[in-house]
Amino acid sequence: MHRALAAAALPLLVLACAPAAPPPAAPSTPAPAIAAAAPDASAQRALGEQLVAAFNDAWNRHDMDAFAALQADDADFVNIFGMWWHGRADIRANHVGIHKTVFSRSRLASVHVETRFVAPDIAVVRWAWELTGVVTPDGQPVPDMQGILVHVARRDGDRLKIVTTQNTQATADAFRAVRGMAPPAPAAQ
């Protein structure tokens, strides 16, 4: 009985273990074109520098509407203290108060900017900053600060829109080393 059952099941087992036939070929269609090619090295630098200049300008005018407009709707932002804000409105709201108090007379300047496109429409913009004019809540001057900001930004027409930001305060020694960096070599074409 077992032998008869095995003999009857053997063809089914062979069929089950046989490699599947390839699926019928789909009609040949060209692959979708990439929406936009990555900009060349000088355009990459210009886009990154444009973003940083707009960031500094909004900060120095204490215009948090302009500051928020640099962010994507779903952006997130981690400040130098590790506070993590989600969404353009939250990023704006958390900068408004500090720009009415401790940062009300602050001036932000960039000293070194590097931009690298990791996809045709996605850039990493990293820049060293100096911040002066900060005061304590009771109005006492704070020593000048320095650090590194990293943005991941998405191309939006002829500019970049910030998707995420990580801000890190740097020690004076680390900052001197960053400030002394040579500009990045142009990317090979």
Image (cartoon, rainbow, N blue to C red):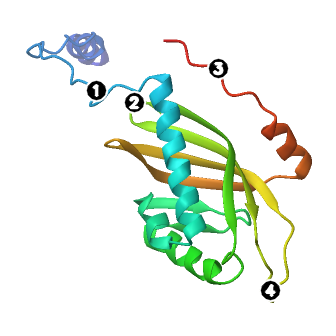
Question: Which numbered disc, 4 or 1, marks the residue closer to the eye?
Answer: 4
> Image point 64% across, 54% down: which residue?
166
Which residue is situated farthest in the right direction here? 173
Residue of label 2: 120
> Image point 78% across, 32% down: which residue?
181
**In the picture, which quadrant includes the N terminus?**
top left
Which amino acid type is shown beneath numbered disc 2? Answer: Pro
> Image point 20% across, 11% down: which residue?
22
For the residues labelled 2 and 1, say whether their Cβ atoms are less than 8 Å apart. yes
- The image shows residue 172 at horizontal and vertical percentages of 89, 51
- Left or right: 119 in relation to 2: right
Q: Secondary structure at mark 3?
A: loop
Q: Secondary structure at mark 4?
A: loop
Classify residue 119 by image quadrant: top left
Mark 2 or mark 3, earlier in chain = 2
Residue of label 3: 185
Classify residue 18 by image quadrant: top left
Residue 87 appears in the rendering: no
Residue of label 1: 34
Residue of label 4: 139
> Is residue 94 or residue 70 the one in the foreground?
70
State the CA–CA distance, disc 1 to disc 3.
27 Å
State the CA–CA distance, disc 2 to disc 3.
20 Å
Question: Which numbered disc, 4 or 3, marks the residue closer to the eye?
Answer: 4
For the residues labelled 2 and 4, say whether their Cβ atoms are less than 8 Å apart. no
